[in-house]
Amino acid sequence: MTDRERGAAGAAGASGPQQVRTPGERARAERAKARPLVQLISDLPRLIVELLKAELNHLKAEFAEKAKYAGVGIGLLAGAAFFLFFAFGTLVAAAILGIAVALPAWAAALIVFGALVVIAVILALVGIRSFKKMDGVAPSQTIDSIKEDADALKGLGKYDN
């Protein structure tokens, strides 16, 4: 570190984070605050395009999040359906064994059936909870943001200056 850098670092640390503005910077800041109406109107299309791009990016992000929850829910419900398919097959086998022969083989088949049903119920409940996290299909955050933007264009509500 050079002496110059040490001096600058020491001055910044001693005086704290202050904004030192030159007269030219102050004049530019004043001109930025008092831009002519023609310039403001000419900036309007660019600002609207930027706003629309930002809203589309927000919409994409919100749909991606909801699609993730839907994908997990669909996968878990498909898993539950898979196990229920085999549970039904096991129940049929248990009924056949129980009717055909009065031996303990059918009891074992019923135990397997019960275990498969428990697995299917757990998967279904977790899948339904995943769907509930999705909170509807409509992109509610984006809709609220667009409503706020429309209100700001009308001069209503809260908006940044």
Image (cartoon, rainbow, N blue to C red):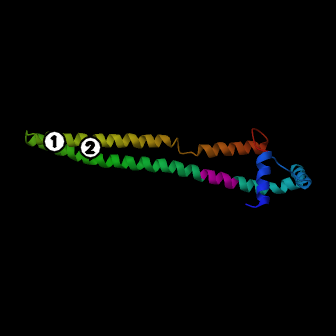
- Residue drawn at x 33%, y 40% as measured from the top left: 121
Instruction: Please give the range of residues in magenta.
Output: 52-59
- Residue drawn at x 63%, y 54% as measured from the top left: 57
Q: Nearer the viewer, residue 85 or 130?
A: 130
Quarter that holds the N terminus: bottom right
Tell me where residue 132 appears, x and y as whole percent.
47, 40
Q: Look at mark 1 in the image and give the residue it sits on.
A: 108
Tell me where residue 53 appears, x and y as whole percent.
68, 55
Q: Which mark is residue 42?
A: none
How many circles with numbers are drawn on the protein? Answer: 2
Check disc 1 and give the amino acid type. Answer: Ala
Q: Is residue 144 left or right of residue 73?
A: right
- Residue drawn at x 50%, y 50% as measured from the top left: 67
- Residue drawn at x 87%, y 56% as measured from the top left: 39
Q: Nearer the viewer, residue 34 or 1?
A: 1
Measure how far apart labels 2 and 1 are at the Cα level: 13 Å
Residue 58 lies in the magenta stretch: yes
User: Could you say which quadrant of the image residue 109 lies in?
Assistant: top left
Tell me where residue 112 appears, x and y as whole percent.
21, 43
Q: Look at mark 2 in the image and give the residue it sits on.
A: 116
User: Could you say which quadrant of the image residue 6 lies in?
Assistant: bottom right
Tell me where residue 142 appears, x and y as whole percent.
63, 46
Is residue 148 visible from the viewing direction of this image? yes
